[in-house]
Amino acid sequence: MNRNMNPSPTPSRQAGKTMIERINTLLTVNLNKILKQEMSNANRINLYDVGEYWVAFEKSAYLLERLVKEDGEPVVLRLKNHPFPIVMQSIYYKRVNEMCHNQVLSKRTLEYLQFLTQPADESSYGRWYEDLLVEND
């Protein structure tokens, strides 16, 4: 595990796409894998590169928001043909560079980073998720 790895903001296979197009591609290709990973997630922030931003979903979004509250509000995604809303939190790639110096980075690929953090409290996560859904109805 390394604290001093700087992530790249521009993956080669998605060059030229907008952030929305990158998120759409990410979810089209990897939604089931992401959600399965988040179901058993307790202490990891899983980030996916979408250009100038990295995004986290579900529990990773909750854990990320606890670290960078001032960086923006989570977004509730209601996807066609998906039975429940998905929460997404984004963070500017320069802030992720700072995280690399302050958090334990446990995995890194060109388009994916995983940081270890303090475990999520399930009841706090549940309240956070429900509050977001109520706010966005």
Image (tube, rainbow, N blue to C red):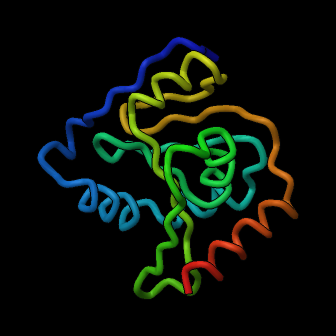
**Residue drawn at the location 79% of the way across and 68% of the way down:** 126
Viewer-nearest residue: 105 or 69: 69
- From the viewer's perspective, is residue 75 above or below residue 99? below
Which part of the image, by quadrant, shows the C terminus? Answer: bottom right
- From the viewer's perspective, is residue 136 above or below residue 62? below
Position of 85 compared to 54: left or right? right
Residue 128 location in percent, x, y?
73, 65
Viewer-nearest residue: 84 or 92: 92
Q: Quadrant of residue 33?
A: bottom right
**Residue drawn at the location 46% of the way across and 43% of the way down:** 91
Residue at the limit of the structure toward the left, as seen here = 16
Which part of the image, by quadrant, shows the N terminus? Answer: top right
Viewer-nearest residue: 115 or 125: 125
Residue 78 location in percent, x, y?
47, 80
Residue at the limit of the structure toward the front, as seen here = 70
Position of 95 compared to 85: left or right? left
Disc tally is: 0
Residue 87 location in percent, x, y?
56, 66
**Residue drawn at the location 16% of the way across and 42% of the way down:** 15
Q: Quadrant of residue 29?
A: bottom left
Residue 20 location in percent, x, y?
27, 61
Q: Quadrant of residue 66?
A: top right
**Residue drawn at the location 57% of the way across and 16% of the way down:** 101
- From the viewer's perspective, is residue 87 above or below residue 11? below
Position of 101 compared to 67: left or right? left
